[in-house]
Structures are given as C-alpha cells and as structure tokens.
Amino acid sequence: MVLSRLICAFLLVACCCCRRAAGVPGEAEQPEPELVEVEVGSTALLKCGFSHSQGNFSHIDWFSVHKEKPALIFRVRQGQGQSEPGEYQHRLSLQDKGTTLALTHVTPHDERIFLCRDKRPRSQEHRIQLRVYKAPEEPSIQLNTLGISVSSREPEEVATCVGRNGYPIPQVIWYKNRQPLKEENRIHIQSSQIVESSGLYTLRSVLKAQLLKEDKDAQFYCELNYRLPSGNHMKESREVTVPVFYPAEKVWLEVEPVGILKEGDRVEIRCLADGNPPPHFSVSKQNLSTMVVEEEKTTDDNGILVLEAVQKKHSGLYQCHGLDLETLVSLQSDPQELLVNYVSDVRVSPAAPESQEGSNLTLTCEAESNQVPEFQWLREKTGKVLEKGPVLQLHNLKREAGGSYRCMASVSSVPGLNRTQLVNVTILGPPWMALKERKMWVQENAMLNLSCEASGNPRPTISWNVKGMASEQDQDPQSVLSILNVLVTPELLETGAECMASNSLGKNTTIIFLELDSNRTGLNTSTVNPHARANSTSTEKKLPKPESKGVVIVAVTVCVLVLAVLGALLYFFYKKGKLPCGRSGKQEMERNTSI
Ligand SMILES: *[C@@H]1O[C@H](CO)[C@@H](O)[C@H](O)[C@H]1NC(C)=O
Ligand SMILES: *[C@@H]1O[C@H](CO)[C@@H](O)[C@H](O)[C@H]1NC(C)=O
Ligand SMILES: *[C@@H]1O[C@H](CO)[C@@H](O)[C@H](O)[C@H]1NC(C)=O
Ligand SMILES: *[C@@H]1O[C@H](CO)[C@@H](O)[C@H](O)[C@H]1NC(C)=O
Ligand SMILES: *[C@@H]1O[C@H](CO)[C@@H](O)[C@H](O)[C@H]1NC(C)=O
Ligand SMILES: *[C@@H]1O[C@H](CO)[C@@H](O)[C@H](O)[C@H]1NC(C)=O
Ligand SMILES: *[C@@H]1O[C@H](CO)[C@@H](O)[C@H](O)[C@H]1NC(C)=O
Ligand SMILES: *[C@@H]1O[C@H](CO)[C@@H](O)[C@H](O)[C@H]1NC(C)=O
Ligand SMILES: *[C@@H]1O[C@H](CO)[C@@H](O)[C@H](O)[C@H]1NC(C)=O
Ligand SMILES: *[C@@H]1O[C@H](CO)[C@@H](O)[C@H](O)[C@H]1NC(C)=O
C-alpha cells in the first residue's frame, strides 16, 4: 500500500513536471488533490485534469479511493463509458466529450478521493477530493422550564440545542443577551453528535450554567455555523429565558386604591418582594394609638389581602412579612399607615321634636368622624337644602312644617363620604277640617253617606250631631276620616248635618247642607224612593196596552147592538100584549137597560 502511494506520488510529481516545464525539477512537491465541493443531493462533476495534448480520453479508468484503497468504478474505452458493478453503478455518466465524470445524487458517503488514470504505459493520474456539504435544519432549542436556583453550586442545564441533518458537523455557539458564551468555570457546553443512516449528522449541545439573579431576564440562544460550497453560513434558534430562582432581599407593601380612603371602599393590600418565587406573605396590623399588633392575616397566592368594605376599625399601621420557604429567612416591609375616613353616629336632638303651631323649634345635629364633619339640613319630601350647618331653626311653625327632615353629615375633603339621620317634626295644633262646609244634593228617604275629614296633632276624634252609623278611618298619624250612614228624613233636610273634630288643643267643625234634588239621574242612592215605586206599580196596572184599545171599542159596540136588539124585542112583546106588564113594569125595564 505504501508502495502504491509512493508510486502515485511519484507519478503525480512526474506529471506536474511534465506539464509545467518551468517547474523546478527534483522538488518533491506532493500535488494536492483537486477539490470539488457539492451539496448533498446534487451532481458532482469530476473533471479528469490531464492536459489535452497528453491525455488520451478515449481510454481512462476511474477509481474511488476508500480507506486509501482505489477501487475501479468506471472505465472509458474508445470514448464509451462503462460503469463497474458496485455502489456507483447507476449514478455515473460521461460528460464534456468524455473528460468529465458526472456523479448524481451525492451523499455524505461520497466524500472521498476520486482518481482517473490513463491507460497508456506512462500512465498519468489525476486526483480529485470530493467534499460534500449539507446545511443543518433550523436549530431547535429546548428550555429547562423547571428553572435554576442561584444557590446551585454547579452549573445547571439552561437549554439544549439540536441541529439535525447537517454535513459536516456544524459548529455550535451559545449566546446570552447576544454575547457569545465561552466555556469557563460557571459555563459548561457539552456537544455531541450522532450519524444518521443517511450519513448526515445531528448535533446536540447542552448549555449548563451557574446563574445569578441578574440572569432572570437573560435571553439565551444557540447558533449553528456551517459551510456550503457557496461559503460560510449560520442559523439561529429562537431566544429563551430560563426561570431563575433567587431569594428575596426586600419586601414592600402597596395599597390600592392610592389616596384618600373612606368607609365602604374596597381596598387591596399588596405584598411584594424582589425574590423568585415570591415568599409566603402575611400582613399584620398595628393599632396606631396603642401600637399593639391586633391581627395577622395571610394573603392569597398573589400576595394580596382584600378588604371588601373597609371600616374605621381597619385603620392602622400595616406591614407585610415574607417568609422564604426555601431559606426560611423572614423579611418584613416598612409599616404603612392605612387611614379609613368615616362619619358615623349622626344624631339629631331632640330625637322626636314636637312643637305647637306658631312656636319656634331648634334642631341640632351631631356626628362622629375622624375629620371635622360638615352638616346640611334637607326637607325629606323635596330634597331641598334648608340650612348649611349643624343647627336648623324653624320659626313660627306652620302646620305644613310638620314631617320629615334629614340631617346629612359629610367631609368635604373625602368625596362621597356622608351619613344621614331622619327626624320627624310633629306640629301640635287644634283640628283642621278638610272642608269647612259642604253642600249635598240628596233625595228624601234615601240612605246617604256623609263624610268628614279632620287633621291635627294629637289626632282628633270626630262626632256627629245626627244619628247614624259612623265609621272611622285613620288616614295617617295626624288625620282621621269619618263616614256617617244616614237616612234622609225631612228633619235632616231641614237641619243639615254637622261634624265636630276635637283634640286636647281645640275643636273645629264642618257643616253639611242637604238639598232636595228632583233630578233622579244625578243621585246615587242605595234605596229607591217609595213614592216612585208606588207610582210606577199603579200606572203599570191602569195604563192599557196599545193593542187592547181596539178590543174595548168592539166590546162597547157589541153591547150597544145587543141592548138595541133586546129593546126592540121587548117593545115587540109589549105591543103584542104577551108580556104582562103595567107602568111599573116599564119603569123596571128602563132601569135595567141603564145599567
Ligand atoms: C488512444 O489510445 C488508443 C488505445 O490505446 C489508441 O488506439 C488511440 O490511437 C489513442 N489516441 C490518441 C489520440 O493517442
Ligand atoms: C386602637 O385601640 C384602641 C384602644 O384599645 C381602640 O379604642 C381603638 O378602636 C383601636 N383602633 C382601631 C382602629 O381599631
Ligand atoms: C320665635 O322666633 C322669633 C324670631 O327669632 C321671635 O321673634 C319670636 O318671639 C319667637 N317666638 C317664640 C314663641 O319664642
Ligand atoms: C353621599 O354618599 C353617597 C355614597 O355613600 C354618595 O353616592 C352621595 O353622592 C353622597 N352625597 C353627597 C352629597 O356627598
Ligand atoms: C318618621 O315618619 C315616617 C313615616 O311618616 C316613619 O317611617 C319613620 O320611621 C319616622 N322616623 C322617625 C325617626 O320617627
Ligand atoms: C278649622 O279648619 C279650617 C280649615 O278647614 C281652618 O281654616 C280653621 O282655622 C280651623 N279652625 C280652628 C279653630 O282651628
Ligand atoms: C256608605 O258607606 C258604607 C261603608 O262606608 C258603604 O258600604 C256603602 O256602600 C256606602 N253607601 C253609599 C250609598 O255610598
Ligand atoms: C239632572 O242631572 C244631570 C246630570 O247630573 C244634569 O245634567 C241636569 O242638568 C240635571 N237636571 C236638573 C233639572 O237639575
Ligand atoms: C252614580 O253612580 C254611577 C255608578 O253607579 C256613576 O257612574 C255616576 O257617576 C254616579 N253619579 C253621580 C252624580 O254621582
Ligand atoms: C206619584 O203620582 C202622584 C200623582 O200623579 C204625584 O203627585 C207624585 O208626585 C208622584 N210621586 C213621585 C215620586 O213622582
């Protein structure tokens, strides 16, 4: 083998010397094989590089050198190519008048030396080094999602980069924040590759590092560098950020909403820390005046304690405590004051004011607050503001001044903070009639309801000067309605009715005048007039029906005719003397007919 190499080398040298007449003779220049670079899958053109004058291209043998052993793969005889059986049998063809051998579907296995040899006795040889390239696929990066603790004493896996199917093996470079990483104490890069059956390489590189807190947002990626016939190229993976765990150094507290708080507000106390993961938080509250810690509550997983509707008791100094469950180190925030503004216990004095009509009344309002409260008086019914200030003066009280008043206590520096108290003012006075007098149209003998309404404080009672069934209804605490059910008699028509309302402070009356009303349709009485009934029943019997008139006339006519015939017959019998009657008999007959 060594011998054959020597021969080859010698031949090559000789060839060179022959070609280059100007070459220095005797110089043992080992000619480099000609380099041919192709991408996997394409066609390699292997040109047998003899000079035309010396080469005889109609008789050439082609060899592939594998493990320094040339194997005949193709022969050219009289310009005709012929593949030798074997791995190249179907992929070789002659091109360019037989000077070039084309190898199709190049694979990584084809990366070797090919040589062509002239068949002449002083045979020449030309060596070609075929180099094969294939760009790796886009590198994929797999992050260690479990994260890395800064307390780790050894480099931990950050990410793994995989570049598939490249040739030759690409170079991997790891980057952190666009700066290339070098192997050092805190950084280990372990790369390995496997050969696929296709001959292509799959590269796998693991980046391990000891990280610091500052690396929590660091962006890592890998880059694959590779060569193609066209030159150097590279492909980058996407960037990843690895979870970094580090203990908190500081705990602090935030209150939402920021600014002035009032009773009823929803308040969030947020505990924050600069560690990852955040520590286990609890919140303590100190009484501002006694400085005694009153309660300690744990927050939710996000470090938030929600006070749905704060009250004055929630005022105090709040502090967050963070316990790192890994290191068991406890940190606490600076205390922060939470001030809940409040207005409460609005009181009006007197609580149940009562005053005589015409007198004066003073109402005073008080309230509890951590601020200086301001007061307003409003009329409940209308909502009208009557007075600004704690005192409401009511002069010369009128009956209408009775009713509800509202005192509102508020704090101008805290918008929306107010509390109110309602108070009912009672005006004491003699009865007051709804109507002083009244006229009613009535019908005699009808049942009638007389009504009378009176108001006053104390509530009046009502009495009537006529007999009847009275019923009372209480309209409201100050007024009463009385209804008297009476029969309309002539005496009542004459006197009318009077209702009298009285209470401890006086009396008052309403007079009801009753007038006869002949217009029956205008009256709504429960009973029907007895005369009207009598009249209607008698006329019903007396008045003939229209169709019976004719019958009466016919009957009278028939009677007259019958009487006439009867008279004629009597006269006939009298003349014939058949009737035994004298003067007296005549008189008797006349009397009968007149009936
Ligand atoms: C090439 O070689 C063949 C056979 O050895 C011979 O017949 C032919 O004449 C040669 N051609 C040239 C140009 O030397
Ligand atoms: C603070 O303590 C005092 C005395 O015990 C108590 O009266 C007061 O209501 C407390 N303050 C709060 C905001 O709870
Ligand atoms: C009510 O107040 C008015 C005005 O202040 C005063 O003139 C009047 O005397 C007072 N009346 C009574 C009954 O006090
Ligand atoms: C009183 O407080 C309520 C809420 O409690 C608010 O809606 C209202 O506007 C306040 N009124 C005034 C006059 O401040
Ligand atoms: C005031 O009167 C109303 C009805 O008129 C009543 O509902 C309310 O409870 C009374 N308030 C007080 C404080 O007496
Ligand atoms: C009686 O009531 C009427 C209203 O109907 C009122 O005008 C009058 O002043 C009252 N009389 C007394 C004595 O209160
Ligand atoms: C009179 O009042 C009574 C009870 O208040 C009622 O039942 C009756 O129907 C009334 N009569 C008339 C005629 O309105
Ligand atoms: C009878 O009553 C009706 C309705 O109440 C009224 O229009 C009419 O004028 C009255 N007639 C007499 C005579 O009063
Ligand atoms: C009489 O009563 C009827 C219903 O029964 C009513 O429609 C009518 O208005 C009443 N008339 C008077 C004058 O009250
Ligand atoms: C009934 O009839 C008599 C005689 O016609 C009359 O005087 C009387 O007023 C009538 N009564 C009524 C209620 O109409």
Image (tube, grey):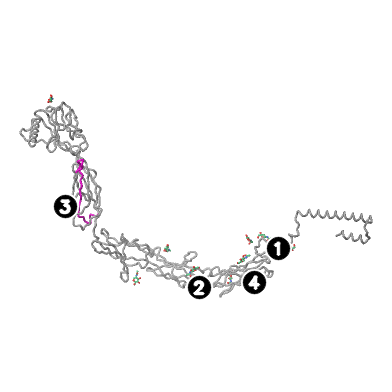
Question: As shown in the figure, which amino acid type bears the numbered disc 2?
Answer: Glu
Magenta segment, which residues?
Answer: 195-216
Circle nearer the N terminus (4, 1): 4
Three-letter amino acid code of the residue under disc 3: Glu
Q: Is mark 3 within 8 Å of ligand 2?
A: no
Name the residue that disc number 2 marks.
354
* In the image, farthest residue toward the front: 578
> Rounded to the nearest whole Å, what is the CA distance between mark 1 and mark 3?
130 Å
Q: Earlier in the sequence, mark 4 or mark 3?
A: 3
Q: Is residue 595 left or right of residue 503?
A: right
Q: Which circle, 2 or 1, is nearer the viewer?
A: 1
The quarter holding residue 456 reads bottom right
Mark 1 vs 3: CB contact within 8 A: no
* Residue that label 3 marks: 184
Q: Position of residue 549 (x, y in %)?
A: 78, 54
Q: Spatial distance from mark 2 to mark 3, Cα to Cα?
A: 95 Å
